[in-house]
Image (cartoon, rainbow, N blue to C red):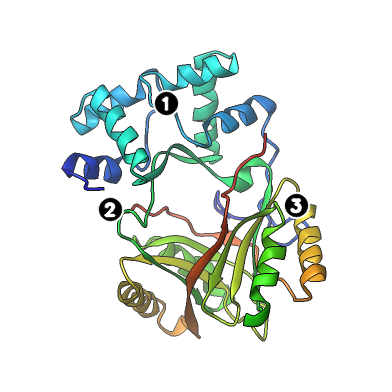
Amino acid sequence: MLMDSVDRTIVNRLQGGFPVCERPYAEAAAELGLSEDELIRRVEALLAAGTLTRFGPMYHAERLGGALTLAAMKIPPQDFERVTAIVNGFPEVAHNYARQHAFNMWFVLATEVPERIEQVIAEIEKASGYRVYDMPKLEEFYVGLRFTV
Amino acid sequence: MNAHAAKVLGHAGFEAAAVPDPVDRRIVLATQAGLPRVSRPYHAIAEQLGISADEVMARLRRMLETGVIRRIGAVPNHYALGYRANGMSVWDVPEDRIRELGRRIGELDFVSHCYHRPRHLPEWPYNLFAMVHGRDRAEVEAKVAQIAVLLGEADRGHTVLYSTRILKKTGLRLGS
């Protein structure tokens, strides 16, 4: 999608701080020098084009009461597809990425209760025959990326 | 510990929180895919949930204050914006300096996430993870080099893991 300068302003300046008030689009639009209608139309178009994946609150997953961890595995190439199917079969696996490294499979486990993390890890190890390296975050140094265009 | 610091409970490193109350939970479910693009979006949510708009807005403000909501706004698709390369840079840094160093790296504008995670010696010596985004690998490499300069002698070894394939991506969602 071709973005004009108004789209770029919206993407760059509305990645946070959207107001919580009766007419938030009107308030945000005024700051950007737009009308409420135009901002709503533009946001809708940016979503439809896939430039934005979402417009709304970004929740902090762990603070919603669940538990989260990052886990890695070292899978020989010839066994990679089989293990992928096993890992992806768990609904607790939220994302799973193949990466170029001896540790070639990296997935995020998200569970409603903390105890379930260890159970899922044990179940994946049993079903796959490979060790799961659990790498939960010990501390987050988060500022938040602002992609600019 | 700052507000984002993990509370280590049971399974090491979990940041556990009170389960949201049922009304908050319904608000999360109604908004996690996005806000309605209508003039009064919070009123629309309130109507859908059968509660007042004032209550919806008060609860959202409270969740912003407590950090349950990181922010409200546009979530860009970084691929669509031209940030096609992402590298997970991982660093072996001294444990006693990790907070100071992690904060400095987390402040860099090209780092989206920066975490302290456990080592698994001897195979995995890295304890600091920083996700670096760029338009291509060369840009990611240049940014990783900037981190190495910033860390100086504290960088006892690092590597960058590029993703080659998304095997699954369902996102983190509360189930209904």
- Please identify the quarter of the rendering in which residue B55 is found: top right
Q: Is residue B160 above or below residue A144?
A: below
Q: Chain of mark 1?
A: A
Q: Earlier in the sequence, mark 2 or mark 3?
A: 3
> Distance between the Cα atoms at labels 1 and 2?
24 Å
The reply to whether label 2 and label 3 mark residues of one chain is yes
Secondary structure category for the residue under label 2: loop
Q: Quadrant of residue B149?
A: bottom left
Q: Are the two marked residues, 1 and 3, in contact with CB atoms closer than 8 angstroms?
A: no
Whether discs 1 and 2 lie on one chain: the answer is yes
Dot 1 amino acid type: Val
For residue B74, side relative to residue A83 (left or right) = left
Task: Check if mark 1 and mark 3 are on a common chain.
Answer: yes
Q: Amino acid at mark 2?
A: Thr
Residue drawn where x is 82% and y is 69% of the image:
A126
Determine crowd level at label 2: few under 14, some 14-19, many 20+ residues with C-alpha closer than 10 A. Answer: some
Q: Say which element carries label 1.
A: loop
Disc ID at residue A148: 2
Protein chain holding label 3 = A
Marks 1 and 3, the one that precedes in the sequence:
1
The vertical placement of A39 against B125, above or below, is: above
For mark 1, what is the residue? A20
Residue with the mark numbered 3 = A114
Residue at point 75%, 57% (across, down) = A117
Q: Nearer the viewer, residue A127 or B11?
A: A127
Badge 1 or badge 2: first in the primary sequence: 1
